[in-house]
Image (cartoon, rainbow, N blue to C red):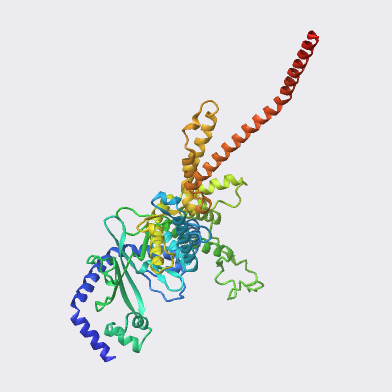
């Protein structure tokens, strides 16, 4: 162990460059920490009232500690659960496809080999998502988005399932954006036991304080910093984790010791925001919009509960000298008073108006439900009965309410998540070998979740309305000549996200049409031949009559000639 300490000391002495790097990294962290401090109290309040199990941002709690001491009404907690579950079902539903891959080169859609390979890739990605912990971790991310407005999920490779995901707590994340508004730098401050640190980084790398604790008190926890940022001094073409596009540096914030320097081929920590203004780095959420209503509702509920307690078990007015103490308020209790006196035990009337309190509380509850889109996404159960068409139309309208959220989540969460997962699986060799002609071809991501489909319904309704009107006008004018039937069919199939396995390629349609035209021509020729034959069959008796008549004429003429000669 002493040799390990000595090696560590020599390493720190000789590697002054690393020390300077850790110092520079930590100075930047101090600035980010100062910038985030104004958000922390806001997040703590939101967590206290809307997500108590994560209410440890500025408050440090023991694991398993009670966290609902401020909750007197659970409307906000239930609204958070409903909105998080709705986003999960509408964006990344485990029981239905929510993305598909396509080639940017549209001509490859007619290539059977290319489409079969792409379909195989998509299927294997879904299998990796289903077998991994993706569903539970992304659901946790939606909780962070609807409460704190900012969420972060870590995507890494897994030897067994191919992919592994981990949603990181907002308390440990410090972020900053680049000039395009994309979060490209993340500082992560987390705790690690001395035993885990020795296992993760190696005992010889650890500072003396942590290394000693690993022997004497292995469960003692220490702060560890991880910095994920674009690598500025990267040498293009050089292979190695220290030269990857995204740098990952772990260091000890106390001794400023670099513990490990590695990297990622793509950004592995994906940060997304629910809503964001142009001057903020962190996101805004529905919980922030209605925090005042949530706090007011809990205060009103607390007051109403106390008022109800006083009405049900009111304080008593007892004469100071008319009764023998103590006063017994239990059922069947006997109270003794001076004989002949008219003194009585009476309840204290506090004048509470419970119906008014209930009405005011219900107004706050409705405001909270509106902020979390509860009524828009979940219509009342006692609504009048409607047709299936009306229900589908209302569902699509409700989903379109989430359009602003969808655009940001697609750009900041779904696209980088699918890209990162694809690249990880590709490097692990989990895909079949692609045909050679696909080398260098770019892929597009298409979103086919229920929420994404709902955004396209407006275009589809416009097309169907146009066809309906044109069909009516076509009765008096050849207006349908303006419609490209093939283009219309392709547009409808794309808008409705019809799977490629049930669609025909362009070459297949051309081949089938040529076969149909050849068959039609052959049928027309056959019908023409049959018509000629039929006409010939109908003319045959007349021809025979004419021949017989001519033959009879010739016979009669011969007989007349013979008679004249005689």
Q: Is 234 displayed left or right of 298 in the figure?
A: left
Outermost residue, front side: 566
Percent across and percent down for residue 64 are: 46, 75
Res 292 → quadrant: bottom left
Percent across and percent down for residue 99 are: 46, 56
Percent across and percent down for residue 68 are: 47, 68
Give the residue at x 59% y 52%: 381
Name the quarter where the C terminus is drawn: top right
Q: Is residue 160 above or below residue 445?
A: below
Q: Is residue 190 above or below residue 547?
A: below
Kindly tell me whether residue 366 is visible in this rendering.
no
Name the quarter where the N terminus is drawn: bottom left
- Looking at the picture, tell me which residue is in the foreground, 91 or 526: 526
- Looking at the picture, tell me which residue is in the foreground, 512 or 24: 512
Percent across and percent down for residue 112 are: 47, 54
Q: Is 396 displayed left or right of 5 in the figure?
A: right
């Amino acid at each position: 162990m002493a040799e390990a300490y000595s090696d560590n000391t020599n390493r720190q002495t000789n590697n002054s460059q690393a020390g300077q790097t850790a110092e520079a990294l930590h100075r930047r962290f101090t600035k980010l920490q100062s910038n985030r401090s104004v958000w922390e109290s806001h997040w703590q309040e939101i967590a206290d009232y809307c997500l108590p199990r994560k209410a440890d941002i500025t408050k440090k709690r023991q694991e398993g500690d009670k966290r609902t001491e401020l909750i007197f009404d659970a409307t906000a907690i239930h609204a958070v659960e409903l909105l998080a579950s709705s986003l999960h079902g509408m964006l990344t539903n485990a029981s239905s496809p929510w993305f598909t891959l396509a080639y940017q080169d549209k001509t490859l859609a007619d290539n059977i080999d290319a489409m079969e390979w792409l379909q195989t890739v998509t299927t294997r990605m879904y299998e990796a998502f289903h077998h991994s912990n993706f569903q539970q971790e992304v659901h946790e991310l939606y909780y962070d988005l609807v409460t704190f407005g900012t969420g972060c999920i870590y995507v890494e490779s897994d030897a067994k399932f191919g992919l592994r995901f981990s949603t990181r707590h907002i308390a440990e994340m410090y972020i900053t954006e680049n000039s395009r508004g994309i979060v490209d730098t993340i500082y992560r401050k987390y705790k690690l036991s001395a035993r885990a640190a020795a296992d993760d980084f190696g005992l010889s790398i650890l500072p003396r304080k942590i290394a000693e604790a690993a022997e004497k008190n292995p469960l003692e926890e220490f702060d560890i910093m991880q910095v994920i940022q674009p690598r500025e001094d990267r040498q293009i073409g050089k292979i190695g984790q220290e030269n990857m596009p995204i740098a990952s540096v772990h260091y000890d914030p106390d001794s400023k010791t670099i513990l490990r320097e590695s990297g990622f081929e793509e950004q592995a920590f994906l940060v997304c925001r629910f809503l964001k203004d142009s001057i903020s780095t962190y996101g805004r959420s529905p919980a922030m919009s209605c925090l005042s209503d949530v706090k007011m509702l809990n205060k009103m509920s607390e007051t109403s509960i106390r008022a109800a307690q006083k009405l049900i078990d009111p304080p008593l007015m007892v004469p100071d000298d008319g009764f023998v103490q103590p006063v017994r308020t239990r059922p069947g209790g006997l109270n003794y008073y001076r004989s002949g006196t008219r003194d009585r035990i009476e309840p204290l009337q506090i004048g509470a108006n419970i119906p008014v309190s209930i009405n005011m509380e219900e107004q706050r509850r409705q405001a909270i439900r509106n902020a979390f889109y509860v009524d828009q996404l979940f219509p009342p159960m006692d609504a009048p009965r409607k047709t299936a068409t009306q229900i589908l139309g209302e569902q699509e309208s409700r989903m379109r309410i989430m359009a602003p959220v969808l655009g940001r989540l697609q750009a900041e969460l779904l696209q980088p998540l699918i890209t990162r997962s694809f690249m990880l699986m590709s490097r692990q060799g989990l895909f079949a070998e692609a045909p050679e002609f696909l080398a260098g071809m770019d892929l597009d991501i298409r979103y086919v979740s229920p929420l994404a489909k709902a955004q396209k319904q407006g275009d589809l309704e416009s097309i169907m309305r146009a066809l309906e009107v044109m069909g009516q006008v076509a009765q008096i004018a050849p207006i349908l000549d303006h419609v490209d039937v093939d283009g219309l069919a392709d547009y409808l199939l794309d808008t409705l996200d019809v799977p490629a396995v049930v669609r025909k390629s362009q070459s297949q349609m051309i081949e089938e049409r040529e076969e149909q035209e050849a068959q039609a021509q052959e049928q027309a020729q056959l019908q023409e031949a049959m018509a000629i034959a039929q006409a010939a069959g109908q003319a045959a008796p007349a021809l025979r009559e004419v021949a017989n008549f001519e033959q009879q004429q010739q016979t009669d003429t011969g007989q007349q000639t013979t008679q004249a000669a005689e």
